[in-house]
Image (cartoon, grey):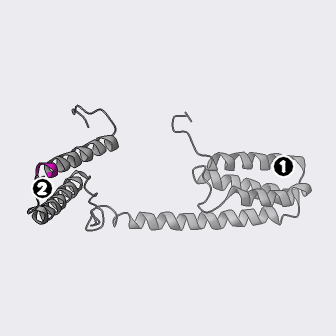
Amino acid sequence: LPGSPCRGSPRTVMRLLRLACLALAVHSSRALRLVPTEGRRAALGRGVAAAAASAAAASAAATAALRPAAALASTAAELTGVQAGFDEAAEKRARYQAMQKDYKKAWRKQLSNLEFSDSDGEALEAIKAIIKLIREHGNEIPQGVRKQDLDQVYKRVQPNLSKPVRMAFLDLDGLVQKAVTVKDLRADE
């Protein structure tokens, strides 16, 4: 505890406080001890039992008082309504989602063109179209699209491609890898 003479952990301090309360309760019960005589044995038995019960209750109360209070959690909502600006941005979010949907559709079309290309010319055209799509959308790939999809298509068509087409795909792969890699905000671009 800051500013207290005890320098132990909170658990140790709590144990010491409990022991002090127990010692106080035991000391007060000893003060009630009477010198037994023949005629007072029955009365003494009741008195000692009452004193012991009183000391036990005092000890329990002191221990309960020294326990840390339970954390009070308020489960009430902090906000009663929609945050300011949320409804105004609904149209902007709808436009963005529509743009992403169109982008994803164009991406899949070009990826399909690459996968089912019959010649190097068709494959090169599909690769250039995908690169153009990525650059038009801020060097990002569509939401929900994985690089793994592109890698699987390339693995299927790679044996049929000539060297210039494979080199173009490596450019596309580097661009996609850069898009999916976590960016360091401290780096200069």
Task: Give the residue type at disc 1.
Answer: Arg
- Give percent across and percent down for residue 166: 84, 49
Taking the spot 71% from the left edge, 67% from the top edge, the residue there is 109
Task: Give the residue type at disc 2.
Answer: Pro
Horizontally, residue 95 falls left or right of residue 112, namely left
Q: Which residue is mark 2?
A: 36
In this view, the residue farthest toward the front is 38
Neighbour tally class for label 1: few under 14, some 14-19, many 20 plus, Cα within 10 Å: many
Query: Does the magenta run of residues contain 148?
Result: no
Horizontally, residue 79 falls left or right of residue 54, namely right
- Give percent across and percent down for residue 179: 63, 49
Q: Which residues are magenta?
A: 29-34
Foreground tag (2 vs 1): 2
Marks 2 and 1, the one that precedes in the sequence? 2
- As drawn, the label of residue 166 is 1
Q: Secondary structure at mark 2?
A: loop
